[in-house]
Image: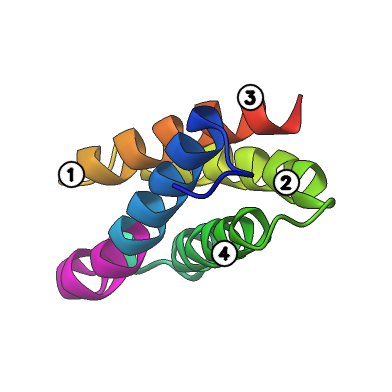
């Protein structure tokens, strides 16, 4: 861990990375395979939006951007929306958990 990163920031970066990978893999390895509500355009869009904002938040923190709090706040909101979209769809429990963990970590960073 770099000197400028707190343990809390490192934990948030780890959560963002995990959520990014989970959302991408769930989209291609589960949602598009299962079809139906899993492959609905609005669902796919929020899951991909979540993956992207997680990657962006991770990058802002990794480079020590002064704007990371703003991006982390947005990330938390999008992760919550993604978790809500995934909730109730069969097999999406890992995505819900990753999104909620990331949202919690990002909310701490945004405060």
In which quadrant of the rendered image does the C terminus lie?
A: top right
Tell which circle, 4 or 1, labels the residue nearer the N-terminal end: 4
Stretch in magenta: 23-36
Q: How far is disc 4 from disc 2 in space, using C-alphas?
A: 11 Å
Q: How far is disc 4 from disc 1 in space, using C-alphas?
A: 20 Å
Tell which circle, 3 or 1, labels the residue nearer the N-terminal end: 1
Q: Secondary structure at mark 4?
A: helix
- In front: mark 4 or mark 1? 4
Q: Secondary structure at mark 3?
A: helix
Residue depicted at x 83% and y 52%: 67
Q: Secondary structure at mark 2?
A: helix
Residue depicted at x 15% and y 46%: 91
Tell which circle, 2 or 1, labels the residue nearer the N-terminal end: 2
- What colour scheme has been applied to the protein in the rendered image? rainbow
Tell which circle, 4 or 2, labels the residue nearer the N-terminal end: 4
- In front: mark 4 or mark 2? 2
Q: Quadrant of residue 80?
A: top right
The tag on residue 47 is none
What x and y, as percent, mark residue 81? 57, 42
Tell which circle, 3 or 2, labels the residue nearer the N-terminal end: 2
Question: Dot 4 surroundings within 10 Å: few (below 14), some, or many (20 or more)?
Answer: many
Does the CB distance between marks 2 and 1 fall below 8 Å? no
């Amino acid at each position: 861990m770099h000197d400028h990163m707190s343990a809390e920031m490192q934990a948030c970066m780890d959560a963002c990375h995990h959520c990014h990978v989970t959302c991408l893999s769930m989209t291609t390895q589960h949602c598009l395979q299962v079809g139906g509500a899993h492959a609905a355009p609005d669902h796919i869009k929020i899951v991909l939006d979540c993956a992207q904002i997680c990657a962006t938040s991770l990058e802002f923190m990794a480079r020590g951007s002064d704007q990371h709090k703003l991006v982390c706040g947005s990330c938390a909101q999008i992760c919550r929306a993604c978790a809500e979209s995934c909730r109730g769809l069969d097999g999406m429990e890992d995505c819900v958990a990753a999104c909620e963990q990331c949202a919690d970590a990002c909310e701490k960073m945004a405060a």
